[in-house]
Amino acid sequence: MGVVDTQHLTKQYPRVRALDDLTLSIPEGITGIVGVNGAGKSTLIKVLLGLLKPTGGSARVLGMDPATQGAQVRELVGYMPEHDVLPADVSAAEFVMHMAMMSGLPRNAARERTSDVLRHVGLAEERHRAMGGYSTGMKQRAKLAQAIVHSPQLVLLDEPTNGLDPRARDEMLDLIGRIGHDFGISVAVTSHLLGELERTVDYVVVIDAGRLLRASPTTDLTHTTGNVLVEVLGPPGSDQLVGQALVDRGIPAWPVGDRIEVRLERPETLDVIRDVVVAQGLGLVRIQEVHHSLEEVFQQPTGGVPA
Ligand SMILES: Nc1ncnc2c1ncn2[C@@H]1O[C@H](COP(=O)(O)OP(=O)(O)OP(=O)(O)O)[C@@H](O)[C@H]1O
């Protein structure tokens, strides 16, 4: 059993079927829920929290049914909503402490937890400033802090990197990684950007038009391509010399920047690469396996892994 299991889950809005017979299981750890805008990610999260009732099928969250046990589910599950819902004239310290007390923590414990989580998310210095003056990155951190302040077993993060510049996005993803791996809180995080979750999540669920496209460990999706990138040390043009020498020996090789990508059709090819580099009087800096990126995976027509 996963931290989340759904069976034929369906949510029909008057005009749109946002979830369509969705059966999936989210394991412990960090899971990415990936899909284009409108795929049904936010609807799924709201159904899992018991904030929306499904029109068909069922869900279990930490073994509970959110349709009938919503309040119990929300005691054990944190939620970071997608949009800016923070009161502008309240400080992060006041807001997060309020949320901690709402979830049942006594005042002193709530104060202590608030100061801990604000430190973890990197808002210790600014915690007494009104949130209306925060940058988008700081607002996302405050939303994250309130989601974890009651030490949930699972946290559902809806597009936490939305609106962030590349640096703030990387920091947010690092933070999510720490919450998942260091604090032992399971995380389900949504994104419409396929590539960005790759280095953070252990498991990927892809949904499209409310349906499950695929679900697998990240490493299965980004399995190795069977190619290697070779970097050599020598005067300009050395890489081309090596590439040509490999092609002359019938080994498929082509330039990628100032490196050479080589198809490993046989294990002996590695020895040939080494011999060719030595024969040219050059140095071998590294030979690196080439992995598919998640983006490449999802550019396949059915989200399948490229051949
Ligand atoms: N309250 C609602 N009433 C009617 N239709 C809705 C409602 N909420 C969402 N939808 C529709 O359901 C579909 C799924 O929306 P949802 O917000 O779950 O997708 P999403 O993958 O989270 O996308 P986004 O990242 O853009 O929010 C969309 O077609 C959306 O227009």
Image (tube, rainbow, N blue to C red):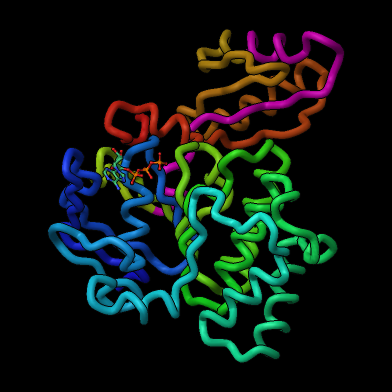
- Quadrant showing the N terminus: bottom left
The answer to which of 1 and 40 lies nearer the viewer is 40
Above or below, 83 against 291 in this view is below
> Would you identify the image quadrant in which residue 143 lies?
bottom right
The answer to which of 182 and 68 lies nearer the viewer is 68
Above or below, 227 against 13 in this view is above
Residue 290 seen in the figure: yes
Q: Is residue 230 magenta?
A: yes
In the picture as drawn, the residue positioned furthest to the left comes out as 56
Q: Taking the image as four quarters, which one is ligand 1 found in? A: top left
The residue lying at 27 percent from left, 66 percent from top is 5
Above or below, 266 against 250 in this view is below
User: Percent position (x, y) of residue 102?
Assistant: 53, 80
In the picture as drawn, the residue positioned furthest to the front comes out as 89
User: Percent position (x, y) of residue 34?
Assistant: 41, 44
The residue lying at 51 percent from left, 59 percent from top is 80
The answer to which of 235 and 164 lies nearer the viewer is 164
> Would you identify the image quadrant in which residue 122 lies?
bottom right
The residue lying at 36 percent from left, 78 percent from top is 71
- Quadrant showing the C terminus: top left
The residue lying at 63 percent from left, 17 percent from top is 256
Q: How many marks?
A: 0
Q: Is residue 90 magenta?
A: no
User: Percent position (x, y) of residue 111?
Assistant: 71, 82
Bounds of the magenta span?
A: 217-245
Residue 174 seen in the figure: no
The answer to which of 184 and 282 lies nearer the viewer is 184
User: Percent position (x, y) of residue 184?
Assistant: 56, 74
Above or below, 109 against 146 in this view is below
